[in-house]
Each structure stands twice: as C-alpha cells, then as structure tokens.
Image: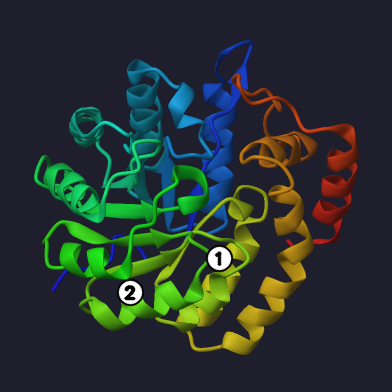
Amino acid sequence: MKEPVFTGAATAVVTPFRNGEIDFPAFEHILEQQLEAGIRAIVVCGTTGEASTLTPEERTLLISNAVVCCAGRCKVIAGIGTNNTAQSVRYAKQAEKAGADALLAVTPYYNKASQEGLAVHYFTIANATSLPLIAYNVPSRTGVNLTAETCARLSPHPRINGVKEASGNLSQVAHIRALCGEDFYIWSGNDDQITATMSLGGKGLISVLSNVRPRTAVRIAECCLNGDFAESSRLQCACLPLVDALFSDVNPIPVKAALEELGLCAQELRLPLTPLSEEKRTILRAALHRCPE
C-alpha cells in the first residue's frame, strides 16, 4: 500500500524576488519559519511560487536550495506542471536530480486536454522518475477539471500518490474518496475548505495561508487528523477574513503583500503580475492583524 507523501499542512511557498533576481536569503528565512511552525512539506515552484516566470535554471536552484535548507526536516515537493507533457517530464527529472521528495503537477492549462489526455499526461510523468506524483486540480486557473472517474483510473499507479483538490466542489471530493482506493490521497487546495475536505478523508492541505500563518494552518490540519473537527472548524472560520483577503487578487499578489507587511520579503512580482492595490492592502493588513497566530 502506498504511503501518503505527507499528512497535515504543507506550504505552497512564494519565490521572493529582489531587483529581478531570486532573493535566496529571504527564501531561506521563510523556510526556517515554516519549519519552526511544524509545516510537514514545502511545495517549491508552484503557482504561488510564480513557476511560470522561472527559468529552468532558477527552478533547479530553488529546489536544491529548499532541499539543503530543509535537510530532511520536512518533505520538499517540486512543482513541475506545464501544458507540455515532455517539458513536465524534463522538469520532473531535474527535480529528482536536485533531491526533491515528490512532484506536484497541475493539469495542463490552455490546451484543455480531454480526460484521456489528462490520464496519459499523468501516467507519462509518473513513469519518468522514481518519485511519487501528486496531481493538482484547479479548474479556475487551467480551464479543465480532473474528474473523480479519471482519478480512479490514475489511483492504481504505484507512483501516483493522490490529488491536490482545488476545484471548490466538495461533491467531487466525496466522489474521489468513494471511487478511488484507500491509498489515493486527497489534500485540500483551498484554504477555506480545509476542514470540510479533511472531514471527507483528506490527509491535509497545500496552503497559501500557511505562508503567513503556518502555525494556524498546522493546527487546523492536526485537529482534523486527531478527530477534533469542532476545533478545526472554529479555527477555519476565524481565518476566513484573512483567506478572503489573500485571494482578493490573483495569487500570489496578496500573499506577497502580506509577507512584506510581516517583513519577510519584498512584494516584488514578475510581470504580468503587478502589486496589490492600496485599497486591498488596507483590508489585507487589517485581516492579518485579526487572524490568530
């Protein structure tokens, strides 16, 4: 039986920039704060990390840096998803060579592949390395939904570990749980649905919120894993204003503004992303101060 890549809270970490280059001292400082808070995995080069603007060399450097910094204290998961299967395979092989523990691959965007195409895409990536692979379903960004039936088709593969579910459709989460084997794992990809997803059998979350409130995200997940859904729900609801503020603009625009408020990195983004408006930043600042640590 396959073991989950991780249980509990993982952070889809930002990529800090300064003067157009990766700010590695800030990146390492953020990772240390995550580790101190008890985060179980770090996702590098994901959507929150502005992966689509990173060069192949920058991707490798970020993954290698995370592996060295984490030093086995948590899992390092490399985002390798693109809309080109061959390119995703190349990134997967680079991530394995750089020391990543697992891979995360978003459904191919823009191409809008059929369910057959999605299945073959994931099988091809999974067959290319020895690392476990997590599929990432986020139709609002990619224009395509990875259905429960396709997840069931993927689930027997020994290296396809499960799915980061960010469709926002809890009925789909339930259908995935019903159709797939017990060792096809589900992680919440929506910070406003952690408790709900875990109540349906999810093993944790891959979070944007945890960039700025890692201890809270860890606690929400741990309560669910310990069967205390009432306390998890209380914490989940207490975080909702901050979660709403973190998604008041395209991710990772607001979370980088929040990290700047906390003195952890500059708000600098790569085009076509632009900084958060002052109006939204005022709301974000207030929500950040109100949300529990």
Question: In terms of image quadrants, where is residue 85?
Answer: top left
- In this view, the mark in front (1 or 2): 2
**Does residue 57 lie above or below 35 as drawn?**
above
208 left or right, relative to 148: right
Residue beneath the point at 52% across and 33% down:
28
What residue does disc 1 label? 218
> What residue is pinned by disc 2?
176
Image x and y of residue 253, in percent: 67, 35
**Residue 159, percent across and down?**
15, 56
Question: What is the secondary structure assignment of the residue under circle 2?
Answer: helix
Label 1 to label 2: alpha-carbon separation: 24 Å
Q: Residue at x 48, y 61 (%)?
A: 167
Residue 292, can we see it? no
Q: Is residue 130 left or right of residue 55?
A: left
Q: Secondary structure at mark 1?
A: helix
Q: Is residue 223 left or right of residue 65?
A: right
Dot 2, crowdedness within 10 Å: few (<14), some or many (≥20)? Answer: many
Decide which of 150, 60 is in the foreground and name it.
150
Q: Name the residue type under label 2.
A: Ile
Can I make out residue 55 in this image?
Answer: yes
